[in-house]
Amino acid sequence: MAASALLAPLLMRAASRAFPPRRPAIASYHVLQPRYKAIELWSQFFAAIGGVAGVCFLLALRPGNTPWLVGVVFGWLVLVPLLFIAVCTLPRGISRWRDFWQYYELHYQISLRFVTPVYALLCLLGIISTAVVLHRYDI
């Protein structure tokens, strides 16, 4: 988990060069920043909580050595902050959800065409890994 915390910013920087945002609208960034900066910062905190919760979940189950452990931890690192972002934005409408992701795209200078499939795969991996671990240990 510590390695992923150290590597994530480096990987995001490299990915932002390979997949720049579609339309760099600096004016809209300054409008969106006050509204979504706190949500983005808190989502980072919730990512850490997700990682720790995933590890605690696995320690409580003691599933042994299985590759599904990695899927649980990495999946929860993405699932928990996405759920937090959804809770903060979706009650105000789908437009707030879209605005947040536009802010995210402009803030990190990375295209959602890259981020969306990666996050979707990690979420799916987390859900499947959690289900497999729970099923194997009859929880």
Image (cartoon, rainbow, N blue to C red):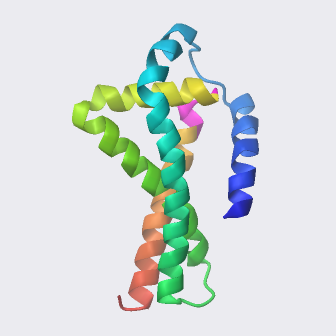
- State the residue lying farthest toward the top: 27
Residue at image point 49% right, 25% down: 103
- Can residue 4 be seen? yes
Q: Is residue 112 left or right of residue 8?
A: left
Q: Is residue 116 left or right of residue 86?
A: right
Residue at image point 46% right, 34% down: 38
Q: Quadrant of the N terminus?
A: bottom right
Q: Which residues are magenta?
A: 109-114
Residue at image point 68% right, 54% down: 5
Residue at image point 39% right, 85% down: 135
Q: Quadrant of the C terminus?
A: bottom left
Compared with residue 90, is residue 17 higher up or lower down, i.e. above or below? above
Compared with residue 110, is residue 27 higher up or lower down, i.e. above or below? above
Q: Is residue 35 left or right of residue 78?
A: left
Total labels drawn:
0
- Can residue 121 be seen? no
Where residue 119 appears, as percent x and y from the top left, is: 52, 49
Using the image as rendered, state which of residue 129 and residue 58 is in the foreground.
58
Where residue 24 appears, as percent x and y from the top left, is: 59, 14
Residue 127: in magenta span: no
Where residue 94 appears, as percent x and y from the top left, is: 28, 31
Where residue 69 appears, as percent x and y from the top left, is: 58, 76
Q: Is residue 5 left or right of residue 28?
A: right
